[in-house]
Amino acid sequence: MAVWGILYGQRAIRRERAFKDPLDQLAISDVDLLRHYRFPRLEILEITDELRPYLERTTERGHAIPAVTQVLAALRFYASGTFQNVIAETMGVHQCSVSRIIGDVTILLTFKEFREINMPETDAEKLQTMLDFANLQNFPRCIGAIDGTHIPIKPPSHEEFIYVNRKRFHSLNVQIICNARHEIIDFNARYPGSTHDSYIWSNSYTRSLFVNGEFGESLLIGDSGYTQEPFLMTPVNNPNTAAERRYNRSHRRSRVIVEQTFGILKSRFRCLHKSGGSLQYNPDKSAHIVVACLILHNMCIKRRIPNPGEDEINNVYQQQQQNAALPVAGLASLLECIYGKKKLNYKKIHNVYGKNNYLF
């Protein structure tokens, strides 16, 4: 009986948890940090400091998992989409802890949405966004390119058939609007894969803002899957005139920015890419993970953090940043196509561009 009491007493004592030293996890080069976590050291510490008050909590077994370890574990998942047990072994924690960490960090990151993802609001912001697009391929008054992409998820337990997209896999249809710098300025991540892009846009809050004139004379550009609207320009079907062909060419070369943005996003955060498998979560949690990755993507773009292994995409981005000012002649031909033949005041257009006022 005494022996049993001793053994029982020993079993009742909870072992204090020990984790890998967070400093050791950061004691690698920024190149390796970028490769594994998509952020350099300073940005990782910045994210950690912001989330620390909500991540570290005392447990019965002693110390909480350090905040930096939790941030690194979540970033590793976003970057690779790998199995939780692999991340657990790397971080020196249990697989169940990794599952909880991903959920906690993801929700906390989504609170940054209104700070990191915004449509241009002031006249100056709208003008700068229009100038950026105009400098790409002479498309005037454009403040965003819109499109949808499919993020693979596991088959949901409820109404799984509505998540099957046209390519026959389960997904969320995530719609974004991006600017000419690959920054995401609007998104909608709550629709199942079978939903058409045009339906998502027609029922979006952002469209209602355009309808109510919140963005003035600004335009969006989208592919032929969308319906042409006064504020949403789509390609001309069967172009017959030189002006229509010029318009389609400029439209196509400007709209490619949203496809590049999807490419950058999915190559940086492989958990969103089909090659990394699918998100093994229910649709709601998968949508939160998507939003967290969109926010992190914008942080990378705004801080000019390179995308490891994607030199070609980065070169395209750098070339776009170095584009020359918009040629007025190119602008005139595009205006003629959109509005029909009319006399243009070239001097006025030049003055408006030079004074940083509203484009039209």
Image (spheres, rainbow, N blue to C red):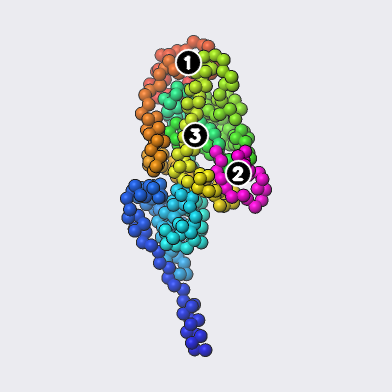
Give the Cα distance between marks 2 and 3: 20 Å
Give the SS element for disc 3: helix
Residue 112 visible, this orientation: no
Write down the residue under mark 2.
Answer: 169
Query: Within the magenta stretch, is there residue 165?
Result: yes
**Vertical side of 337 occupied by 85: above or below:** below
Residue drawn 39% across and 29% down? 320
Write down the residue under mark 1.
Answer: 333
Instruction: For the residues labelled 3 and 1, say whether their Cβ atoms are less than 8 Å apart.
Output: no
Residue drawn 53% across and 32% down? 146
Of mark 3 and mark 1, the one earlier in the sequence is 3
Disc 1 residue type?
Ser
Image coords of residue 69 (percent x, y): 41, 57
Write down the residue under mark 3.
Answer: 259
Q: Which residues are magenta?
A: 149-170
Give the SS element for disc 2: loop
